[in-house]
Image (spheres, grey):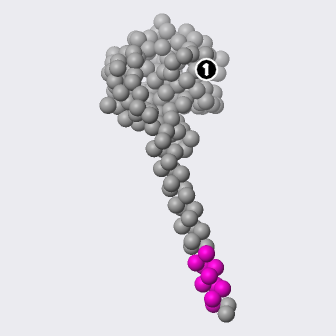
C-alpha cells in the first residue's frame, strides 16, 4: 500500500513540473511574439545603421525579461514628446564616462569601439552641454536607473547630448530586426 502512494506522489510531482514548464514556455512565447511590432523609422539620426523610412521590428516586451546592454538599439518614449526616439545605448548605470579631446568616448577609462558610426567622431562637442553638466554633477558616473543613449549619426541626432541621461522607464522597447 505504501508503494502505491509513493508512485502516485512521484507521478503527481512530475505532472505538476511538466505543467509549470508548459505554462512558462507558453507565457514566454505569448509575450515575446505579441510584443513585436513592425515600425517605420523617420529621420537620419541612426545612419548608417537605420535609414530614413526603413522598417524595423521592435520588441516592446523585451526589457521585461532582459537587461539593457551597451550597444542595444532602443526605443525611448518621453511623456513630454509626441514621437518616440530610436537610439543606441552607449553607457550603463554606474559607469564612468569621459569625452576625450580626441573626439572619442571612454567608458571606465577604456575607449568605446564604435564601428557603426556614420562619422568617425564619437560626439558633437557643441551639443554636449546638457549632458556634460549633468555628468559633472555625478562625477562623470551615470547614476543608477539612467542610461547614456546616442544616435549613430552624431552630427544629426537629438539624443543624450541634447536632453541628458535617459531613465530606464523611458526605454520601452528594443530593435530586434532591421529590414
Image location of residue 15, percent across then percent down: 57, 71
Q: Residue at x 40, y 32 (%)?
A: 38
Asked whether 14 or 47 is in front, the reply is 14
Judge whether 107 appears above or below 7 on screen: above
Q: Which residue is mark 1?
A: 79
Q: Residue at x 61, y 20 (%)?
A: 79
Q: Which residues are magenta?
A: 3-12
Q: Quadrant of the C terminus?
A: top left
Judge whether 10 appears above or below 130 on screen: below
What main secondary structure does the magenta stretch of the protein show?
helix
- In this rendering, position of residue 39 left or right of residue 9: left
Q: Secondary structure at mark 1?
A: loop
Density class for disc 1 (Cα within 10 Å; few <14, some 14-19, many ≥20) is few
Q: Residue furthest top?
A: 126
Res. 69 in view: no
- In this rendering, position of residue 37 left or right of residue 12: left
In magenta segment, residue 57: no
Judge whether 40 appears above or below 125 on screen: below
Image location of residue 81, percent across then percent down: 56, 16
Amino acid at each position: 500500500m505504501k508503494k502505491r502512494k509513493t508512485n502516485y506522489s512521484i507521478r503527481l510531482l512530475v505532472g505538476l513540473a511538466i505543467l509549470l514548464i508548459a505554462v512558462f514556455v507558453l507565457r514566454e512565447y505569448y509575450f515575446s511574439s505579441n510584443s513585436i511590432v513592425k515600425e517605420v523609422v523617420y529621420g537620419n539620426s541612426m545612419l548608417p545603421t537605420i535609414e530614413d523610412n526603413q522598417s524595423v521590428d521592435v520588441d516592446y516586451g523585451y526589457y521585461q525579461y532582459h537587461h539593457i546592454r551597451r550597444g542595444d538599439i532602443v526605443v525611448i518614449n518621453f511623456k513630454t514628446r509626441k514621437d518616440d526616439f530610436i537610439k543606441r545605448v552607449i553607457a550603463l548605470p554606474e559607469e564612468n564616462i569621459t569625452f576625450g579631446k580626441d573626439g572619442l568616448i571612454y567608458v571606465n577609462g577604456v575607449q568605446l569601439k564604435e564601428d557603426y558610426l556614420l562619422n568617425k567622431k564619437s560626439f558633437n562637442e557643441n551639443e554636449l552641454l546638457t549632458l556634460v553638466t549633468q555628468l559633472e554633477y555625478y562625477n562623470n558616473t551615470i547614476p543608477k536607473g539612467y542610461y547614456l543613449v546616442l544616435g549613430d549619426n552624431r552630427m544629426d541626432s537629438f539624443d543624450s547630448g541634447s536632453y541628458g541621461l535617459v531613465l530606464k522607464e523611458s526605454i520601452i522597447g528594443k530593435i530586434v530586426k532591421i529590414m
